[in-house]
Image (cartoon, rainbow, N blue to C red):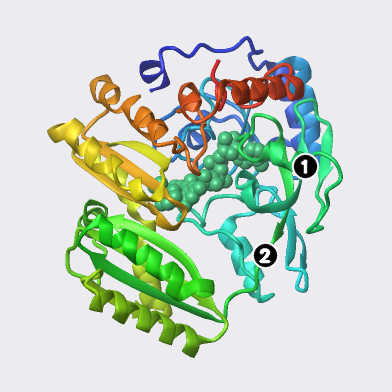
Amino acid sequence: LTKDRYPHVKRGDYATLDENHLRFFTELLGTNRIVTDPSQCEGYNVDWIKNVRGYSQCVLRPKTTEEVSRILAFCNEHRIAVCPQGGNTGLVGGSVPVFDEVVLSTSLMNEIISTDDTSGVLVCQAGCILESLDTHLADHGLMMPLDLGAKGSCQIGGQCGTVLGLEAVKANGEILDCLSTLKKDNTGYHLKHLFIGSEGTLGIVTKVAIHCPPKPKAMNLAFLGLDSFESVLKTLKKAKHELGEILSSCEFIDERSLDLVTSRLKLKSPLAVHPFYMLIETHGSNNDHDEEKLNTFLENVMAEGLVLDGTATNEVSKMKNIWELRERITEGLPLEGYVFKYDISLPIESFYSLVPAMKERLGESAVRICGYGHLGDGNLHLNICVKEFTQDVLKRIEPFVYEFTSKLKGSISAEHGIGFRKPKYIHYSKSHTSIELMKQLKTMMDPNGILNPYKVLPS
Ligand code: FAD
Ligand code: MLT
Ligand code: ZN
């Protein structure tokens, strides 16, 4: 796979694992926490959408920061390349080895260290699974500040955008303690931010401190059908004005995306077919107040003809069914064949423009072209499904998709990162000066380049 699709990538000048290396790892972790059996290594070598495949023959499963530190110090000294891996749900090929890098899996680093009901601060190890943390917090009347479709598998260490503080291990094994739980601490450079967006190339995050909001007493969800993108924009604006402080999510689905989950996954939609759909969720502390507000909003947008059809509910099972229509699109896509995935930020008025542009460009060569995403954040997920991968289709999509985004001053990766798939396109979103500074930081923090090579930065 890697060889055919990425002929330009050459293995770096790293050591090949030998008996002495394996002996060190086994003495440190014991035989139970090192995987060398090729069939058991398989799952760690292939990414979730099966775009990238490495051939690592060694997976290490540390439990503590000190073990991570000793592994990295050893790998640094012996120039062994390391690929950090959490839940392996990443969508840009960053979490799997490209060649034979040792996989450092954080799956066993899943201890919750403390939960403070008053400040809402949770401190835990990096390998805790998002959904498990949310379940734990519910007992304390709190919730995680983020949610995603991969919540059942993805781990917190790979999602540091919202942390108060963190602990990380540098390439040379040094432990960097930025695990502050203070809301305000403006003492010098905010080093924790170096690890946000670095995708395992600057250090391995071992612990995080997260500020968790109280779990809302009331949740309401509306699902709307609309006939034009113009109506979508007007409805978004009205939702912001009329729902104000209780508006918590605004998600977007186009007709081809909804068709995917209803036809391929047999999910049931409560609405008839429309060109566009919106999910609007509210979180608040008084259900009567929130329900009334959402129903009034729904009546208004329907009376104005912006929304053709809509339903609102606060029944847990109905809300879950509606959310599945949005969250399970990702799962349906690979059933169509090969998926070209794009995760774009665009100015809100141009949010959907890439989808028709791509349909015109590709015509019949794609099985399905669809758009969905986080409308409230201006983050579109454009997905192009083809029966099978061909260089010809790839050349018609890239770099067009990035040029289009860059011209509109958008971002070529809104949330999924750069990983292995996008380093050569990073310049569409970052200036030469920024990329050079990133390279200098990489050289300073990981001089031997052992941490997640071939990822994020262009060679
Ligand atoms: P992995 O995939 O294992 O790793 C991701 C990257 O982080 C890799 O580069 C890896 O090397 C690095 N890494 C992992 N752990 C560490 C660590 N402890 N220290 C340093 N580096 C580390 N993403 C979104 O942003 N929003 C969504 O709504 C969303 N929905 C998704 C829905 C589905 C169904 C799927 C499959 C994926 C979705 N994703 C989404 C993508 C993915 O789940 C997230 O990016 C998630 O944060 C990855 O977590 P993970 O534990 O699986 O990390
Ligand atoms: C989502 O919002 O569903 C995720 O980011 C995954 C995807 O882009 O498919
Ligand atoms: Zn997303």
Image height of 137 relative to 12, above or below: below
Please tell me the numbered disc located at residue 212: 2
Query: Looking at this view, is 30 or 410 the one in front?
Result: 410
Asked if residue 27 shows in the view, the reply is no
Q: Residue 33 falls in which quadrant of the image?
A: top right
Residue 278 as seen in the image, left or right of residue 150: left
Q: Please, what is the three-letter code of the amino acid marked with disc 2?
A: Cys
Q: Residue 307 falls in which quadrant of the image?
A: bottom left
Image height of 398 relative to 157, above or below: above
Image point (75%, 27%), residue name: 171
Tell me the SS state at disc 2.
loop
Residue 447 as seen in the image, left or right of residue 149: right
Please tell me the numbered disc located at residue 190: 1
Query: From mark 2 to mark 1, how far is it between C-alphas?
Result: 20 Å
Ligand 1: does it lie within 8 Å of the C-beta at label 1?
A: no
Q: Please, what is the three-letter code of the amino acid marked with disc 1?
A: His
Tell me the SS state at disc 1.
loop
Asked if residue 284 shows in the view, the reply is yes
Q: In the picture, which quadrant includes the N terminus?
A: top left
Q: In the picture, which quadrant includes the C terminus?
A: top right
Nearer the camera: disc 2 or disc 1: 1
Residue 265 as seen in the image, left or right of residue 408: left
Image point (50%, 24%), residue name: 427
Query: Looking at this view, is 23 or 194 the one in front?
Result: 194
